[in-house]
Amino acid sequence: MTLLEKEKQQLNKASLKRIIDIDFNRDAKIVAEGDSWFAYPLIRDVLDHLRKMGYGIKKCSKAGDTLENMVYGAKYKIDKKLHLVTNSGPENLDKVKEAVQDYRPRFFLFSAGGNDIIGEELIRYLNHIRHNQQLYREEEFNTMLERFMKPAITYYLEKIWEVDNSIDVLMDGYDYAKPNGKSYNLIGIKLSGPWILPGFGAKGITDRGVQETILKKMIDRFNEMLIEIDKEHPHFHHIDLRGNFPNDKQWHNEIHLKSAGFKTVAKQYHEKIKNLLGYNPI
């Protein structure tokens, strides 16, 4: 076990002890669900930094998870003998609801949507450069947000609020990802990624400026959707990270920040919590 792994383990242990403690300040208790921004093994992620600040956190997040799986459940099993397929249902959502019920946190942190857009999904929203049409399928992307992503997030929120209608949900919309071809590596071995550049390459879109323009439009529209939800639900709070990390050097790879970046994100969540409470709970 590396020193980082030991540190993460110790931070998680101390954080769980806080959230279990009935005498610990409820305003500093958090249940978190999400993707790799809340569960990144190579460096300190957002939750690691919040734990270090002193929050009590129950983590339900895992790297690579999709919004669809978090909300509805995408796991399935195939019975080869009976030639049937079964779906496991909303296991993740059920676990989150149980955690909210058990720990009674004051805040719920949510990081989702990125893995439903990047990777193999990115190609859906691009035309080939030789197709002689607009490269970015903007209407198709916007339709997906309105017909799938926004309803899925809203449904998820409603299920959380069925358990506790007073809990405040905080969610960011990421910053502009970097199409630089960097992957998720461990000791020089590629484990995952790159997630963005291959899609652009497959469509012949090789100009970095054009790539960044398309990504900016996508991230902006995703954030605009979250702002809409923020306006519609008083206990949902969008955190805007756009423009905070403009340089490639601030990113660990195409879609993950370095530890210093995740620390900045954690501080923004902390500031939002302080503003909502009117005091510093830690």
Image (cartoon, grey):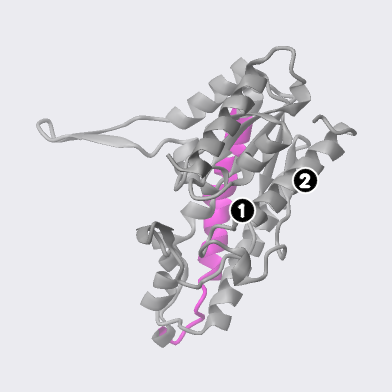
In the image: residue 56, left or right of residue 253? right
Residue 280 in sight: yes
The residue wearing badge 1 is 259
Considering every residue shown, the one lying at the far right of the view is: 278
Q: Nearer the viewer, mark 2 or mark 1?
A: 1
Q: Give the vertical position of 45 relative to 17 (above or below).
A: below
Question: Residue at image x 71%, y 24%?
Answer: 165
Q: Quadrant of the C terminus?
A: top right
Q: Give the vertical position of 191 relative to 127 (above or below).
A: above
The CA span between labels 2 and 1 is 31 Å
The residue wearing badge 2 is 231
Residue 53's spot in the image, x, y percent?
73, 37
Residue 138's spot in the image, x, y percent?
55, 69
Tell me if residue 229 is in the magenta stretch. Answer: no
Q: Give the vertical position of 154 relative to 164 (above or below).
A: below
Residue 152's spot in the image, x, y percent?
55, 42
Which image quadrant is residue 272 in?
Answer: top right
Question: Is tag 2's residue or tag 1's residue first in the polypeptide sequence?
Answer: 2
Q: Quadrant of the N terminus?
A: top left
Which image quadrant is residue 258 in?
Answer: bottom right
